[in-house]
Every structure is written in C-alpha cells, then in structure tokens.
C-alpha cells in the first residue's frame, strides 16, 4: 500500500510492503516538492497489523499538520508502481 500526503510545498509518502523474507516493512519518505531535500526511513514491523497501525498514526499526524491525502494506491496499480519507483530513487546513496 502506498499513501501520499502533501501541502503546497512538502510531501510525505508511506509504503507498507512485505520483503522477500515475508517481513513487513514500513517505509516513510518526506521532503520538499520539486527539490532533493528530504529523507527516507524504513522500519521493520512485527506484523501487518503493526504496520497498518503505524499508517493510521501517520495519517493522524499528517492531518494535524495540514497535509492532505493525494494518493492511496495498491503497489500493483499504475499509480502505486510510479510512487514506488520515485521512492526507490531516494534510497540510493
């Protein structure tokens, strides 16, 4: 699952997925729209339920900061694949 929130200048993108070992990964990217400023952090969840709880917490935090949800997509949808490819660009040193 991919979820993206934005303000006029900033974004937060969360990707919840399983890795090749079956572990649930919660990836969070953030930054300024149109720049290279930002970051990426990965967290290993105990299970899918914990990853989804973190996603709910993130939604609450972003709403309180004035961010609006602009994308919620499955990894296999065209929008989801595009978002994952953008996320992958941030993961290079």
Image (cartoon, helix red, strand yellow):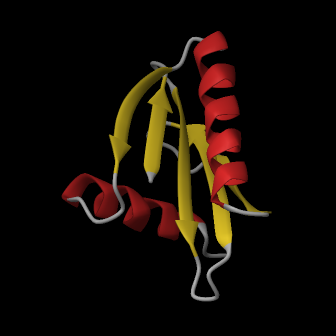
Residue 88 percent coordinates (x, y): 50, 69
Q: In this view, does 1 lie to the left or right of 77?
A: right
Q: From what the image shows, is residue 37 above or below residue 61? A: below
Q: Where is residue 17 in the image (x, y as percent from the top left)?
A: 54, 65
3 in relation to 80, above or below? above
Q: Quadrant of residue 55?
A: top right
Q: Which of 87 and 75 is in front in this view?
A: 75
| Residue 35 image offset from top left, x and y in percent | 51, 44
Residue sitting at x 67%, y 76%: 23
Q: Say left or right for 36 vs 85.
A: right
The residue nearer to you, when weighing 52 against 66, is 52
Against 8, residue 75 (above or below) is below
Q: Which residue is drawn at 66% across and 11% down?
A: 64
Identity of the residue drawn at 60% across and 40% down: 31
Where residue 85 sits: x, y (%)?
39, 67
The image shows residue 21, relative to residue 45, as above or below, that is below
């Amino acid at each position: 699952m991919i979820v993206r929130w934005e303000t006029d200048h900033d974004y937060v993108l969360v990707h919840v997925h399983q890795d090749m070992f079956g572990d649930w990964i919660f990836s969070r990217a953030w930054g300024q729209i149109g720049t290279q400023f930002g970051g990426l952090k990965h967290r290993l969840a105990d299970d899918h339920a914990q990853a989804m709880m973190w996603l709910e917490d993130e939604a609450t935090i972003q709403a309180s900061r004035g961010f609006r949800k602009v994308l919620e997509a499955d990894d296999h949808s065209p929008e989801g694949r595009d978002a994952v490819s953008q996320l992958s660009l941030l993961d290079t040193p």
